[in-house]
Image: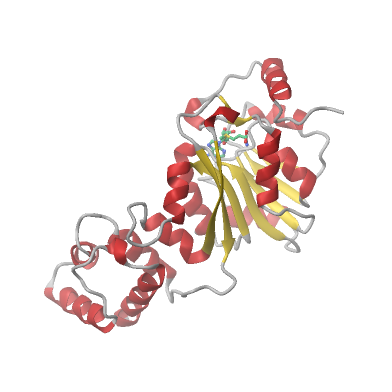
């Protein structure tokens, strides 16, 4: 019986056998604690009814846990050097496909359609490369794929932004974008000591579950997304200043905005961070309706 890929000994052996050096620029901090790897898989409540997309398999430590618990696993890894290593470490698992792809350039909807049978739930489980946590999350949310659950490790600060309530310092466009689709749960904090090499920040596992009944539905999601981003563009400025910067400062636009805000009983003098997800949806829907 071989030790798990993510055990200290096995990881050290694999790195030595291939002479692999870490690429800091790719956010390569490998998890070397089988207990935590198992906790990530169990936070995703994986069963053979699930297909899993993994981003950044590294040397396959988390992938192994996913392969042992899920139906099919598709893993996207940007670093070509890791492909032969993964072919070797994951050889015992016939339900894993690894593709040499940049998650920020890949067409996720097509990949998932081509690799999964459509008969299983689709989940994302990953220990994310931290330098692109936010773009990856936005890409997952905007991919058009209805992921049932997303369980991802990220830097603690970003996890707090995802879970933030309106009015708090950490609340921003990312909080709104995520909470619009998903319920956010901070599963647990992971100390930096379990990674090689050690990152500078502590990490957190976040579990996002799709709302069964969405609290609010935007009639036009592009209008909603643009409104949310625009409302936080200058955090210190009022909603009014951000909205006129976004939509225009001419008198017709100002009159239309005044009308919409009054109808929705939203004070133009407040800051965007005061608005809940539902407030943003109401406002976006009123703007969409007005534009017609
Ligand atoms: N899953 C492994 C683990 O838990 O030990 C490695 C996680 S490491 C934090 C992040 C991984 O993402 C690295 O393997 C890195 O090469 C990969 N990566 C970085 N940027 C990527 C991108 N744009 N697309 C796909 N993978 C990427």
Residue 134 visible at all: no
Q: How is the image coloured?
A: secondary structure
Asked whether, in this view, residue 71 is left or right of residue 106, the answer is right
Q: Position of residue 190 (x, y in %)?
A: 56, 38
Furthest toward the right, the residue is 1
Q: Quadrant of residue 57?
A: top right
Give the vertical position of 289 relative to 203 (above or below).
below
Q: Position of residue 223 (x, y in %)?
A: 37, 69
Q: Identify the residue at horizontal 22%, vertical 62% (top origin).
A: 242
Asked whether, in this view, residue 24 is left or right of residue 251, the answer is right
Q: Identify the residue at horizontal 16%, vertical 79% (top origin).
A: 255
Q: Quadrant of residue 193?
A: top right
Q: Identify the residue at horizontal 18%, vertical 68% (top origin).
A: 269
Q: Position of residue 1 (x, y in %)?
A: 87, 28
In front of the other: 195 or 128? 195
Quadrant of ligand 1 in image: top right
Give the vertical position of 3 relative to 98 (above or below).
above
Asked whether, in this view, residue 26 is left or right of residue 15, the answer is left
In front of the other: 227 or 166? 166
Q: Identify the residue at horizontal 36%, vertical 70% (top origin).
A: 280
Give the vertical position of 93 relative to 121 (above or below).
above
Give the vertical position of 181 relative to 204 (above or below).
below
Furthest toward the left, the residue is 251
Q: Position of residue 230 (x, y in %)?
A: 29, 60
């Amino acid at each position: 019986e071989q030790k798990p890929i993510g055990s200290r000994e096995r990881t050290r052996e694999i790195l030595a056998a291939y002479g692999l050096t870490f690429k800091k620029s790719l956010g390569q901090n490998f998890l070397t604690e089988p207990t935590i790897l198992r906790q990530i898989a169990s936070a995703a409540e994986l069963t053979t009814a699930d297909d899993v997309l993994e981003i950044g398999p590294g040397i396959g430590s988390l992938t192994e846990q996913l392969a042992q618990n899920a139906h099919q696993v598709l893993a996207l890894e940007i670093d070509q050097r890791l492909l032969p290593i993964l072919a070797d470490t994951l050889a015992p698992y016939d339900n894993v496909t690894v593709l040499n792809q940049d998650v920020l350039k890949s067409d996720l909807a097509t990949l998932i359609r081509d690799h999964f049978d459509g008969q299983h739930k689709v989940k994302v489980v990953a220990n994310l490369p931290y330098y692109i946590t936010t773009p990856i999350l936005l890409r997952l949310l905007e991919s058009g794929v209805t992921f049932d659950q997303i369980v991802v490790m990220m830097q603690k600060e970003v996890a707090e932004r995802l879970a933030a309530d309106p009015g708090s310092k950490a609340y921003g466009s990312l909080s709104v974008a995520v909470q619009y689709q998903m319920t956010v749960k901070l599963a647990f904090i992971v100390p930096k000591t379990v990674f090689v090499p050690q990152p500078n920040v502590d990490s957190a596992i976040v579990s996002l579950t799709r709302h069964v009944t969405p609290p609010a539905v935007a009639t036009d999601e592009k209008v909603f997304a643009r409104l949310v981003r625009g409302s936080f563009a200058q955090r210190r400025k009022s909603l009014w200043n951000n909205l006129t910067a976004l939509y225009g400062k001419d008198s017709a636009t100002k009159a239309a905005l005044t009308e919409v805000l009054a109808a929705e009983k939203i004070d133009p003098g407040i800051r965007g961070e005061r608005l809940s997800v539902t407030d943003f949806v109401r406002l976006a829907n009123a703007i969409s309706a007005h534009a017609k």
